[in-house]
Amino acid sequence: MLCHTSCLLEAPLSFEWQKNGLYIKSGSKLEVTLSPGDYITCAARQQQHQHISISPPLYVLKRPSVSLSHAGDILEGRPLTLTCDIDNFDNSSATVDYCWSKKKNVFSDDEVLSKGRQLVFKSFKSSDSAEYWCTVENQLGKKTSEPVRIDVQRMSWRTINIIRLFCSAVVVVGILIILTLEFRTTTSPSSTANPNELVQPAEQLDDGDYDDIDAEDAL
């Protein structure tokens, strides 16, 4: 590897190499054995000054993996985000390119989709069902993740029928409640007397209808 800078600095310049954050060598060239997960940086120094320019870390890439934004069944029409992850990798400072691909079935060709760490679906459809994988690449090589199969889960006809029956039952119960309330309203007796109905007085017997009984007659 070769360390250089495009800054217009006065000579002399010196370069230092670091592996995983630790100093290993001075000089503009470096030959070193690295393992997946290791990273290298080089720094330019002018005479006895502190480092005036430090390169972004250059990683020996590990194999990435694909993670989904949520677990469980993927329902049609639901948003979904796929993320390409690398263990112990600093995405904020390292330079790496991401690329997404998919394959619908064994008879179809690989299809390159887009670049970027994430693949976003605003509405995942049945036509999107396929195997997905990501590839990461930098100056030291590239690695590809294991493919992840994603299929849309549709509701079964049995589930749909149960929902329909439940909705129908709710409607029927609502109608029966309304009819019952209306029936009670129309058949309930009125507690207010009708002013047009007059109460008829009891018939009085005429005094002439009675015989006077004397004590003497009783004897």
Image: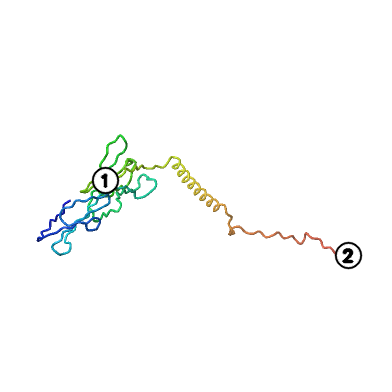
User: How many numbered tags mark residues here?
Assistant: 2
- Residue 199 on image: x %, y %: 64, 59
Q: Earlier in the sequence, mark 2 or mark 1?
A: 1
Q: Nearer the viewer, mark 2 or mark 1?
A: 1
The Cα–Cα distance between marks 2 and 1, rounded to whole angstroms, is 142 Å
Tell which of 197 and 27 is nearer to you: 27
Mark 2: give few (<14), some (14-19) or many (20+) Cα within 10 Å: few
What label does residue 216 carry, if any?
2
Rendered residue at 36%/50% (across/down): 70
Q: Look at label 1 and name its amino acid.
A: Lys
Secondary structure beneath dot 1 equals: strand
State the image coordinates of residue 15 (x, y, percent, origin top left). 16, 58
Q: Nearer the viewer, residue 211 or 154?
A: 154
Left or right of 6? Residue 37 is right
Q: Amino acid at mark 2?
A: Glu
Indicate the quadrant containing the C terminus: top left, top right, bottom left or bottom right: bottom right
Residue behind mark 1: 143
**For numbered disc 2, what is the local secondary structure?**
helix
**4 relative to 164, above or below:** below
Residue lying at 84% horizontally and 63% vertically, measured from the top left: 213
Image coordinates of residue 211 in percent, x first then y, are: 81, 61
